[in-house]
Image (tube, helix red, strand yellow):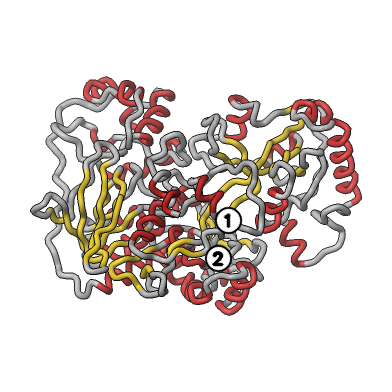
Amino acid sequence: MTRYFLSRLGFTIFFIPVLLAVGWVGHPSRVLAQQTETGGSTADIVIVGSGLSGLSAAWEAGRTGARVQVIDMWSIFGGHGVAAGGVLNMVGTPVQAAKGIQDNPELAFNDFMRWGEDPNPEWVRYYVENSSRLIHDWLAGMGIEFGDVGRNPGNTVPRVHRTQGGGQALVTAVYRECLKFPNIDFTWNHKVTGLLREDNRVVGVEAENLRNGEKFEVRASAVILATGGFQSNLEMVREFWSEDMKVPERILLSSGIEALGSGLELAREAGASLNYLDHQWNYSSGIPNPVYPGTDRGLFARSSAAIWVNMEGRRFVNESESVKVTTPAVIDQTTSSYWAIFDASGLEQLAVRGTTAWEDPKQVLLEKYPQVLPSAGSIRELAQIIELAPDALKATVDRYNSMVAMGEDEDFDRFSSTSSPAKDLIRQAYDAQKIEKPPFYALHTFAVTRKSMGGVLIDLSGRVLDGTKQPIPGLYAVGEVTGFGQINGKAGLEGTFLGPAIVTGRVGGREALAALGETPTREVTQPLPPSAPINVSINNDVCLKCHPVARLIATQRPGYLHFERAHGIVLERNDSCIQCHGEFDPVPKGSHQFDRQAQVENCVRCH
């Protein structure tokens, strides 16, 4: 397995699934970890990764004063979670109670175990008994609000809570809380390349600055791996593909840019047990990302009004079924792909995810990338464009329309005149409607990766276990690198990725802190006061005298991908610097002290 990791874990720069805030990329964080005589540093706890699980662990470990060093390969916080829909599967919450929904841990436990088939029962039990307290109450205290509560397939009652503002709002709220503790230090654009070990105990990390190649060490009493999964490492995805399905001819990648499996290699070298790597949650509605032609990067694109046809122009599955059903059905087709066919009304229901840089993804596809979303004035003309048999596709659409008029899908039971709780649940988001209003559209659609549900084996304290299921002293892991504690088993209930990221993160941070014993009170270096201002108001001419942005982004530099992408958008729109850097008005003398709390507000300018 080693060959997959070290050869594939370089900092990939051809794709950026999430472009976050403008103007605060890569600026040196304050150095709070104590410097050693050798040029390295020390901390109480090192956390590798600043996604939702890493931030949750940092908050839990840092709130009592422990020195926490968070190291991330990227220029900003968030990981994969900022691009997520923000749904959370929680049990027995005040939101449910207010809606009259009767839920309890035993009911939820049975749902998790039945749907997932082989999840870790200990983690499932812990999650269903504590999710309301550890997730709902915690986030509500940060100002997070929850909207509707849905009952997605696999859940006996509605318990999938939708976060107002989606994953970005959720992750940003946790990051803001971490910034309130000056003893939590963030180091960006650095990759952890190895774990320091003494007498079989993990005592720190080795890291490399991705911008200049400099290497250093951070020694600590505990290391928490929060590095995410491996769903952007195509070689690993193929190698550990489930034996229950054939390996598709083409697999698109839509996970985070850092989801390359780096944490798995770090843990493996320390003797960790890796489990269930074939448990991968992959979707059936991926399209090639046109921004990166010639690559395997993908977007999620789905219209609830579309029908799915294979290369023979025939339907092959109930399009409204869960991923648990549709993904194997897609992969079983001759080319492991299909065409999603819909009309002008179906276009209104098209959802495109995986890029937060497009304000209106549908319009971008129509105007800039029509080859990805071909259209025609008739079904026969559309069939010719996408190289399907016109008679076959026309017959399929006609039959579907006739069944809609009749109110009964006799082929795949997508809709029916009869009613049952299970059927109604699946159909609630898929209103049957004819495909008859031109223009007609098609999307060539493939299996697309999303989340890892296997990984580093941990116990209920977040401690990493070796091959004999004994804890490796000083080493913890949280979030997707653990397969979310293997809470999902083979199939995830919706909302069971962000939720377990928070729970495993909080548990890992708490237990790593407890293992330190009493944390002594320390003097913490406070940020320097702002410099006295120059008597000049900020404007683009003033800024660009010292910061030649156009020249800086013209040549790609290692570790500057977000800076280049974000400021490229700024230049394209001819935005004013003050929109994102208002804290520098008037312009200060000397170096600029960035206000990271204020900069978080800038995410919405691009997303």
User: Measured along the vertical axis of the image, is residue 68 above or below residue 507?
Assistant: above
Which secondary structure lies at badge 1? strand
Q: Quadrant of the N terminus?
A: bottom left
The residue lying toward the viewer, choosing from 552 and 447, is 447
The residue lying toward the viewer, choosing from 218 and 173, is 218
For image coordinates 22% across by 75% down, the residue present is 517
Q: Is residue 373 left or right of residue 290?
A: right
* Number of the label disc, if any, that sits on residue 488: 2
For image coordinates 14% across by 44% down, the residue present is 529
Residue indicated by mark 1: 281
Which secondary structure lies at badge 2? loop
For residue 77, say whether it is visible. Answer: yes
For image coordinates 58% across by 42% down, the residue present is 252
Number of numbered discs: 2
For residue 173, say whether it is visible. Answer: no
Where residue 402 appears, as percent x and y from the top left, is 90, 44
Q: CA distance from mark 1 to mark 2?
A: 10 Å
Displayed quadrant of residue 66: bottom left
For image coordinates 15% across by 27% down, the residue present is 535
Extreme residue toward the left, this view: 37
Amino acid carrying mark 1 in the image? Trp
Where residue 374 appears, as percent x and y from the top left, is 70, 28
The residue lying toward the viewer, choosing from 296 and 84, is 296
Discs 1, 2 touching: Cβ within 8 Å: yes
Where residue 340 appears, as percent x and y from the top left, is 72, 40
Where residue 486 appears, as percent x and y from the top left, is 50, 66
